[in-house]
Amino acid sequence: MDRHKVTHTGEKPFSCDICQKSFAQKSTLETHKVIHTERLVYSCFVCQKTFLNKYTLDIHTRTTHTGEKQFSCDICQKSFSSKGHLNQHKIIHSGERPYSCSICQKTFQHRQNLNQHTITHTGEKPFSCDICHKSFTQKSNLETHKITHTGERPYSCSVCQKTFQYKHALNEHTRTHTGEKPFSCDICQKAFSTKSNLTTHKVTHSAERQYLGYFETRLRAETVKKPFSCDICQKSFSTKSNLTRHQVAHTGGKPFSCDICHLLFTKKKDLDQHKLTHMDGNSFSCPVCQQTFSDSGDMITHYEKEHRSPR
């Protein structure tokens, strides 16, 4: 229980007297100290990387080269290359989130997720490339970056032996052999082997929705009943009042008269707008250019001459 409690506090009381690296458990420190005193005797037959013991060599071989996954989840049957990875995975089924950020109280299922999150508050990038000095917030990102300098392709397909620089690239490639399509569209349920393909597919739904919305709007406009038809141009209207206002355009009638200057208008809204020009009460204003006249007749003469289009 005491050893377990340390996983919540983050305390690392055991420090290496050679390199000062700290550990949560004494047994882990003792295992670490071997690297300072003994040779790495277990060598990978594929990439010649060396390890302290056969256990870590076996994990390396499975995760990096063979793709073997002998540890299976008894709930969802998903397989993993190491028991530690399986145990981490099982937390997603329990829903437990035991790791809490002391700054924003956000909780996490795994300790490493909390550590990665904490850096977002500090902005710290403690992992630096010794070749180009680019810094990273996570060690895994640094290791992935370093491959770009070496050209190494450590991840090998167990089916066709094709090699890859990155683990995620190998995983995507492996699905071309298995036919697995774990990424499913939540709109049409179509499945894809890669997340990028799913993202590209979803764009088609966005465009489709925009098109359908436009089509439905047009369709509604076209299907609205318009029983009132103009006997001159056959244009149809949904109401009789709209037809009446339209027919004025054919007759040239101007039934709306200004009670101040007697100027005539085809539409009532044009008359109402015109009346605003008389608000000062002392002059008559042209409704187009706002030039003022002391006599209404002069204003009408000006309007007819300067602004009225000839028929």
Image (cartoon, helix red, strand yellow):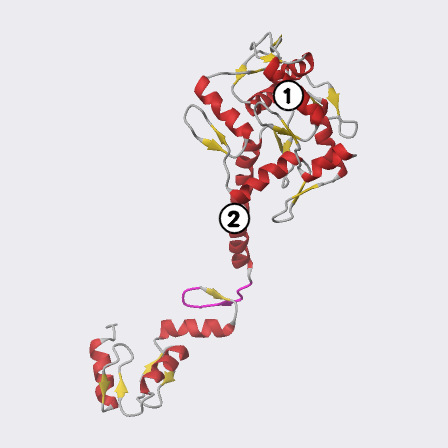
Question: What residue do we see at 27% from left, 77% from top?
Answer: 288
Q: Residue furthest front?
A: 17
Classed neighbour count for the residue bearing mark 2: other residues with Cα under 10 Å, few (<14), some (14–19), many (≥20): few
Q: Compared to 285, does 1 lie above or below?
A: above
Mark 2 vs 1, N-terminal side: 1
**Span colored in magenta:** 225-234
Classed neighbour count for the residue bearing mark 1: other residues with Cα under 10 Å, few (<14), some (14–19), many (≥20): some
The label shown at residue 128 is none
Please provide percent x and percent y for residue 134: 43, 30
Question: What residue do we see at 75% from left, 23% from top?
Answer: 72
For this rendering, which residue is in front, 222 or 294?
294
Helix, strand or loop for the magenta stretch, by majority:
loop
- Look at the image and tell me in which quarter the N terminus lies: top right
What kind of element bears circle 2? Answer: helix
- Look at the image and tell me in which quarter the C terminus lies: bottom left
Please provide percent x and percent y for residue 230: 45, 68
Question: What residue do we see at 44% from left, 20% from top?
Answer: 149
Give the foreground label among 2 and 1.
1
Calculate the distance from the C-alpha at mark 2 to the C-alpha at mark 1: 60 Å
Report whether 211 appears left or right of 178. Answer: left
Q: Compared to 289, does 30 lie above or below?
A: above
User: Label 1 sits on what residue type?
Assistant: His
Whether residue 228 appears in magenta in the rendering, the answer is: yes
Residue wearing tag 1: 32
Q: Quadrant of the rendered structure where residue 186 is?
A: top right
What kind of element bears circle 1? Answer: helix
